């Protein structure tokens, strides 16, 4: 840095950029300082229409987020004039040891700071001002989105090392990531407000509007309400409520799947390579066997399901919609209780729509069973745990609407699906069965639906069953009628378990 710039920075009293792990003392430090501010600031200067005119903002207000050890405080006021130098509000803060810093590049805000090194920032802002909304909306978003919260903390650590003596460079380098977060936060909050039938009270951290009525959001039937099934075939207002729920769930699941896809895909590719090596050895030991095939279909594309496909699947499967609603209502209880950290909604959604991130492995008939077990073992070696496996292959003349094996695995807190198919089944599906299945899934007429079901059974009945397929360990067969009920989320200590 040039000497003249360093001299200017020193004259401004800027401290070096230091980013720390989250400190559980920060909320108490805010509470103590907020109490002092509340006592010192005359009531007529604060905005009486706001339930919480003094609010903890910034990174120190988000549990688990790495931050500079500076507590940011937003004070919501009626107007900014009393906070100019020499006026009543500014004099109050200066008597508490705060330095006046003006707008400092942020319109419609007056900024004060205290301490050497600086310990407190006070942002004087009006209700609804642009920076006020951005600060509190970002706080709510980061509280609910652990992945972005962790990414932001990691980014800060890297930038603090690169710009230790350049606070402007540090701030500017964060801007691209923060712009993305602000955009996501805006879309997320709009979805939440649609879902909850009212605006989010940013200062209180809860929804100010009414909760959805039992008649439109209840997951059980009763005299004054109706089941999800009857709602979706009933009045348009009720259908819109279900549609909002489905669209919100689809948006969250789609985003979550994209976040996990790079890590999960790397593990799946490694497992497929490992399984192929096992099959190659099997082929070498049995010369009469055809060349072993173990390949990922449609990789790396078509791994994450489209949002509209996820939403449609929710609306066509009432149980899944009800599972999501259970998780959402539990989250809302936590919100209204003031506990915003660790809401389990996103985790709970994984088992509800467990195939948002889905892989298809294609195997030769002769080595199908060996390929499935080898692939699973290689997944486990990389830290994945098996949730459930389901066998769609028919047993002793049974008739099925699908064929293949569908397996569900958990990596950390995320559930993903792997489907195992034969080459013949894949070709048949592409040429004929997939369009038929889509038609079957969306058909409402019972007679036509039954005919389509018979067509599916007859079509899949032409697929040869691979040898030894029913000897795979851990297999559940036949496919249970209450399959989806096994994925209803339950909670233990704030986390969901399947």
Image (cartoon, rainbow, N blue to C red):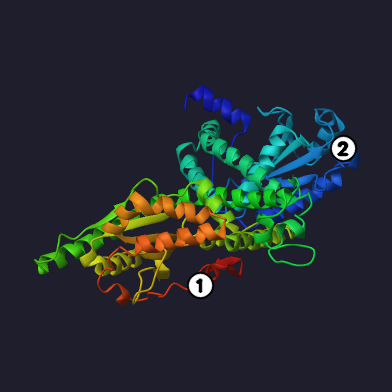
Is residue 260 placed above or below 405 in the rendered structure? above
Contact (Cβ within 8 Å) of mark 2 with mark 1:
no
Q: Position of residue 324 (x, y in %)?
A: 61, 59
Q: Residues within 10 Å of mark 1 (few under 14, many from 20)?
A: few
For mark 1, give the secondary structure.
Answer: loop
Is residue 3 placed above or below 115 in the rendered structure? above
Q: Label for residue 481?
A: 1
Q: Position of residue 217 (x, y in %)?
A: 71, 58
Q: Counting residues from the N terminus, which is met first, the one under dot 2 or under dot 1? A: 2
Q: Label for residue 424?
A: none
Residue 470 is drawn in which quadrant?
bottom left
Question: Could you tell whether 287 is left or right of 467 in the image?
Answer: left
Residue at 10%, 66% in the rendered image: 288
Please give the residue where the numbered disc 2 appears in the rendered image. Answer: 45
Q: Position of residue 59 (x, y in %)?
A: 61, 46
Question: Could you tell whether 3 is left or right of 325 in the image?
Answer: left
Q: Nearer the viewer, residue 482 or 345?
A: 482
Q: Is residue 231 in view from this perspective?
A: yes
Q: Residue furthest top?
A: 4
Residue at 55%, 26% in the rendered image: 7
Residue at 72%, 34% in the rendered image: 111
Q: Is residue 117 in view from this perspective?
A: no
For mark 2, give the secondary structure.
Answer: helix
Q: Residue furthest right?
A: 44
Q: CA distance from mark 2 to mark 1?
A: 64 Å
State which mark lies toward you, 2 or 1: 1
Question: Could you tell whether 73 is left or right of 167 in the image?
Answer: right
Q: Position of residue 197 (x, y in %)?
A: 75, 49
Question: Could you tell whether 187 is left or right of 222 in the image?
Answer: left
Residue 10 is drawn in which quadrant?
top right
């Amino acid at each position: 840095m040039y000497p003249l710039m360093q001299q200017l920075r020193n004259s401004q009293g800027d401290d070096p950029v230091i980013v720390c792990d989250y400190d559980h003392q920060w909320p108490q430090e805010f509470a103590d300082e907020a109490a002092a501010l509340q006592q010192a600031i005359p009531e007529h200067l604060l905005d009486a229409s706001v339930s919480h005119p003094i609010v903890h903002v910034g990174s120190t207000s988000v549990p688990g987020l790495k931050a500079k050890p500076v507590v940011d405080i937003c004070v919501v006021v009626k107007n900014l004039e009393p906070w100019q130098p020499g006026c009543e509000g500014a004099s109050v803060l200066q008597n508490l040891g705060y330095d006046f810093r003006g707008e400092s590049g942020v319109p419609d805000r007056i900024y004060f700071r205290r301490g050497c090194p600086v310990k407190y920032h006070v942002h004087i802002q009006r209700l609804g001002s642009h920076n006020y909304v951005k600060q509190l909306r970002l706080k709510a978003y980061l509280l609910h989105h652990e992945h972005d919260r962790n990414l932001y903390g990691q980014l800060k650590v890297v930038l603090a090392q690169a710009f230790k003596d350049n606070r402007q460079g540090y701030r500017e380098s964060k801007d691209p990531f923060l712009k993305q977060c602000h955009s996501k936060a805006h879309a997320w909050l709009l979805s939440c407000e649609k879902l909850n039938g009212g605006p989010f009270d940013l200062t209180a951290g809860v929804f100010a509007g009414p909760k959805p009525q039992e008649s439109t959001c209840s997951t059980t039937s009763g005299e004054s309400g109706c089941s999800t099934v009857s709602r979706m075939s009933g009045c348009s207002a009720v259908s819109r409520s279900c549609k909002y729920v489905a669209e919100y769930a689809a948006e969250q699941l789609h985003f979550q799947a994209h976040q996990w896809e790079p890590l999960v895909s790397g593990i799946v590719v490694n497992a497929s390579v490992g399984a192929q090596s096992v099959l190659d050895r099997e082929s070498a030991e049995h010369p009469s066997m055809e060349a072993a095939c173990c390949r990922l279909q449609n990789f790396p594309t078509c791994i994450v399901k489209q949002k509209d496909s996820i939403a449609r699947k929710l609306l066509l499967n009432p149980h899944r919609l009800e599972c999501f609603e259970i998780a959402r209502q539990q989250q809302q209880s936590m919100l209204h209780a003031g506990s915003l950290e660790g809401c389990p909604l996103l985790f709970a959604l994984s088992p509800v729509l467990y195939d948002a991130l889905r892989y298809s492995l294609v195997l030769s008939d002769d080595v199908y069973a060996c390929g499935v077990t080898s692939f699973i073992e290689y997944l486990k070696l990389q830290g994945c745990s098996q949730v459930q496996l389901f066998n769609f292959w028919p047993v002793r003349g049974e008739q099925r609407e699908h064929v293949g094996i569908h397996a569900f695995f958990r990596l950390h807190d995320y559930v993903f699906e792997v489907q195992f198919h034969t080459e013949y089944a894949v070709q048949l599906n592409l040429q004929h069965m997939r369009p038929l299945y889509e038609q079957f899934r969306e058909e409402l007429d019972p007679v036509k639906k039954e005919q389509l079901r018979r067509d599916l059974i007859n079509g899949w009945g032409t697929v040869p069953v691979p040898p030894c397929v029913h000897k795979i360990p851990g297999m559940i067969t036949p496919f249970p009628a209450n399959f989806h009920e096994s994925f209803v989320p339950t909670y233990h200590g704030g986390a969901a378990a399947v």
